[in-house]
Image (tube, rainbow, N blue to C red):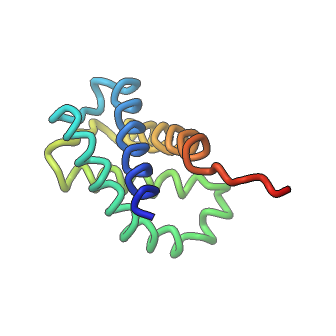
Amino acid sequence: MLRRILIRWAILAIAFAVTVALLSPNIKVVGGFWGYVWVAALFGLVNAFIGTFLKILTIPLTIITLGISALLINAGLLALTAALTKKLTIHGFWTAIWAALIISIVSMILNRLLLDRRPKKA
């Protein structure tokens, strides 16, 4: 259990690093390695508590908009994370949208590669 949490945390930190590399200078994480670790932890907590509530609340809207509202919620949670820490800076609404999309894609790929390893049934 703890191992999976630490792997997900590392995946999120890597996703932030990829996002910063792709969208620089419009998004920045300061503090090097520990900055990414801190931002990933904070974003994970914001997403776990506030994001879960918002995503459950907006299920009908997510279905109607074919998932676009989920992307907007993730961008808002990312902006909230940036507001809570000085280690993350996001310049503009569209940067937050693109960052949320990139973080989602990178996290999904890495989660599938690293965590979805189930033994095959004989």
Which is more toward the observer, 11 or 18?
A: 11
How many marks overall? 0
Residue appearing at x 39%, y 32% in the figure: 19
Query: Quarter of the image containing the N terminus?
Result: bottom left
| Residue 48 place in picture, x, y as percent | 40, 66
Q: Is residue 60 above or below residue 86?
A: below
User: Residue 45 or 116: which is nearer the viewer?
Assistant: 116
Q: Give residue 41's quadrant in the image.
A: bottom left
Q: Quadrant of residue 66?
A: bottom right
Which residue is farthest front? 122
Q: Looking at this view, is 116 or 51 the one in front? A: 116
Residue lying at 19% horizontally and 32% vertically, measured from the top left:
32
Q: Nearer the viewer, residue 2 or 103?
A: 2
Residue 92 percent across, percent down from the top left = 31, 38
Q: Residue 34: x percent and y percent?
A: 20, 40
Residue at the extreme right: 122
Seen in the image, is 82 located left or right of residue 54?
left
Position of residue 13 relative to residue 49, above or below, is: above
Q: Quadrant of the C terminus?
A: bottom right
Is residue 91 shown left or right of residue 71? left
Residue 65 location, x and y as percent? 64, 57
